[in-house]
Amino acid sequence: MGMIFFTLALFGFGCLTTLAAFSSERLLFTRERANGYYNPFTYFAAKLLFDVIPLRVIPAFVFGAIVYNPVGLVPQVDSFWRFILVLVLFNLSASSVVLLLSILIKNAGVANLVGSLVMLFK
């Protein structure tokens, strides 16, 4: 239980790094959207494709594959895939919450504080 808790805490607090990235992109996004370069759906799809998949799904899968056997979790294939699924889904949900906070809160310091509090209670 402790290993799973600390693993989820690692991934949850690791998602907080995207708070500052989106706040710095906000001005660029509004300027480019106002000029008609792309619509919000295109920006969101690119964010999902190049931020969520390589930074949230792949690390959770690799970490789970490396850690599963050495820590002595249940040596069954279905339990392994359930563990990977929990890691990936938690990482995606934490990333979604952080993305929502970065959209709602314009100040990066306040967003970091609120994001840390949310991750503590998540």
Image: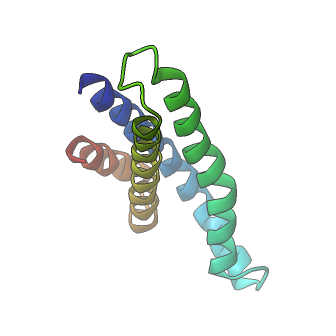
User: With respect to residue 99, does 54 lie above or below?
Assistant: above
Q: Is residue 39 left or right of residue 22?
A: right
Give the quarter of the figure containing the N terminus. top left
Looking at this view, name the residue that lies furthest to the left. 121
Q: Is residue 19 left or right of residue 86?
A: right
User: With respect to residue 47, does 57 lie above or below?
Assistant: above
Picture coordinates of residue 107, whole percent (x, y): 42, 56
The chosen color scheme is rainbow
Picture coordinates of residue 63, whole percent (x, y): 53, 29
Q: How many marks?
A: 0
Which residue is more in the foreground, 84 or 41? Answer: 84
Q: Is residue 120 left or right of residue 68?
A: left
Q: Residue at x 37, y 53 (%)?
A: 111
Q: Residue at x 40, y 31 (%)?
A: 10
Which quadrant of the structure image shows residue 4? top left
Q: Is residue 119 left or right of residue 42?
A: left
User: With respect to residue 88, does 69 lie above or below?
Assistant: above
Looking at this view, name the residue that lies furthest to the top. 70
Q: Residue at x 73, y 75 (%)?
A: 32
Q: Residue at x 63, y 79 (%)?
A: 40
Picture coordinates of residue 108, whole percent (x, y): 44, 51
Picture coordinates of residue 83, whole percent (x, y): 40, 38
User: With respect to residue 74, does 37 lie above or below?
Assistant: below
Which residue is more in the foreground, 41 or 91? Answer: 91
